[in-house]
């Protein structure tokens, strides 16, 4: 009986250790987000769906960008996808391959990632012959995904 319990405990310890290692690898380069709300203690920092979506996007973009749905272009520092629900003829969304929550969180060292996105925008503008277009990024409370991204829209 004790041996069986020890074997089960040993397997659980291995699974737990593996989970900790994989979690550490997946979330090692993400921006902190408050995921638990305890009363009103976290105030404006409490997680919203957009925060959880941003965390998932961060893990996907940094570790498995080839699995991004609707990807159209990619370079070493940015990935571009076609917006899935846009009424516009051209609507691309650009995600830097570094977890930056919004324009206000851009810091020293993030320049190559922002410039990589601008380079991809230029490529798509040229490729599709766009001359009438808008480029924008939403602020933190306007984002559906709390992860810096840029829109390129044209009809």
Image: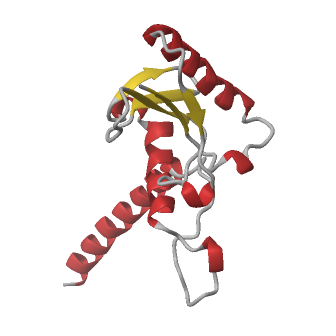
Outermost residue on the bottom side: it is 39
Q: Residue at x 51, y 48 (%)?
A: 25
Foreground of the two, 109 or 139: 139
Q: From the top left corner, tell me how far across and down residue 118 is, in percent.
A: 62, 23
Q: Residue at x 45, y 30 (%)?
A: 92
Relative to 17, 113 lies left or right = right
Foreground of the two, 55 or 11: 55
Q: Residue at x 64, y 80 (%)?
A: 43
Q: From the top left corner, tell me how far across and down residue 129 is, in percent.
A: 47, 9
Decide: is 62 above or below 5: above
Relative to 82, 126 lies left or right = right
Picture quarter containing residue 134?
A: top right
Q: Where, quadrant-wise, is the N terminus in this rendering?
A: bottom left
Foreground of the two, 125 or 73: 125
Relative to 54, 117 lies left or right = right
Q: From the top left corner, tell me how far across and down residue 137 is, in percent.
A: 60, 42
Q: Where, quadrant-wise, is the C terminus in this rendering?
A: top left
Q: Residue at x 47, y 54 (%)?
A: 144
Q: How many marks?
A: 0
Q: How is the image coloured?
A: secondary structure
Decide: is 102 above or below 129: below
Decide: is 37 above or below 24: below
């Amino acid at each position: 009986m004790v041996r069986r319990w020890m074997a089960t405990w040993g397997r659980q310890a291995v699974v737990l250790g593996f989970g900790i290692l994989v979690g550490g690898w997946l979330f090692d380069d993400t921006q902190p987000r408050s995921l638990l709300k305890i009363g009103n203690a976290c105030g404006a920092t409490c997680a919203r769906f957009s925060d959880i979506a941003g965390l998932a996007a961060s893990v996907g973009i940094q570790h498995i960008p080839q699995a991004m749905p609707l990807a159209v272009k990619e370079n070493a520092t940015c990935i571009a996808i076609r917006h899935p629900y846009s009424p516009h003829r051209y609507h691309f969304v650009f995600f830097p391959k570094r977890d930056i929550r919004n324009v206000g969180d851009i810091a020293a060292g993030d320049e190559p990632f922002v410039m990589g996105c601008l380079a991809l925008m230029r490529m798509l503008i040229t490729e599709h012959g766009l001359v009438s277009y808008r480029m924008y990024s939403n602020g933190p409370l306007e984002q559906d995904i709390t992860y810096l991204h840029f829109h390129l829209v044209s009809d």
